[in-house]
Amino acid sequence: MKRVLVVTVGLLVAALIVIQLIPVDRSNPPVVADFDGPPEVAAVLRASCYDCHSHETRWPWYSRVAPVSWLVVHDVDEGRDKMNFSRWGALDLDRRAKLAEEIWEEVEEGEMPLLAYRLAHPDARLTDGSRSLLRGWAADVRRTAR
């Protein structure tokens, strides 16, 4: 029984070592047209959103360790696909208004930033003041687009 346990643990360790060789793309493409909103809103977005929703991702040490790296890269890829502040300035006003509304809805419902991200990055947690700021900004963007 002890031999089975040793072999099982050995295989698990070997598998963990081998999966480190599977490459993942942790790149940051060039910023096309960065967010051009109010500086105080930009500061909140940079602190709480940019790692997954821009081409300015800060890749922490654990993003280099499989299988966690796969999850981090997946979340960043998905976040950039859904909404990317590195392309914000190239969007038309109607698209900005729609995205600003979606951003506020996600924040209001507590869906964003993701819980796992908030746990790993306590500084990304939104305060009541930053939520209020985002709510007002989203309303301003919607009014501007009308």
Image: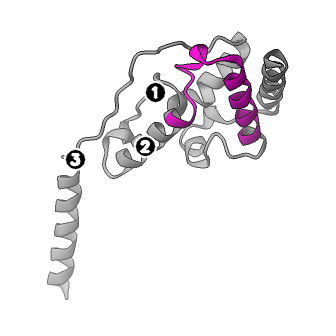
Q: Which residue is mark 1?
A: 57
Task: Specify whether 59 is left or right of 14.
Answer: right
Residue 98 location in percent, x, y? 72, 30
Disc 3 crowd rating (10 Å Cα; few below 14, some 14-19, many 20+) is few
State the residue at coordinates (55%, 27%).
84
Mark 1 residue element: loop
Q: Earlier in the sequence, mark 2 or mark 1?
A: 1
Q: Quadrant of the C terminus?
A: top right
Which mark, by number, is residue 72?
2
Q: Earlier in the sequence, mark 3 or mark 2?
A: 3
Q: Quadrant of the N terminus?
A: bottom left
Marks 2 and 1, how far apart at CA: 11 Å
Task: Specify whether 81 is left or right of 18.
Answer: right
Q: Is residue 119 magenta?
A: no
Closer to the camera, 62 or 135? Answer: 135
Magenta-colored span:
81-106
Q: Quadrant of residue 25?
A: top left
Which mark, by number, is residue 22?
3
Looking at the picture, which amino acid does disc 1 mark? Thr
Mark 3 residue element: loop
State the residue at coordinates (14%, 82%).
3
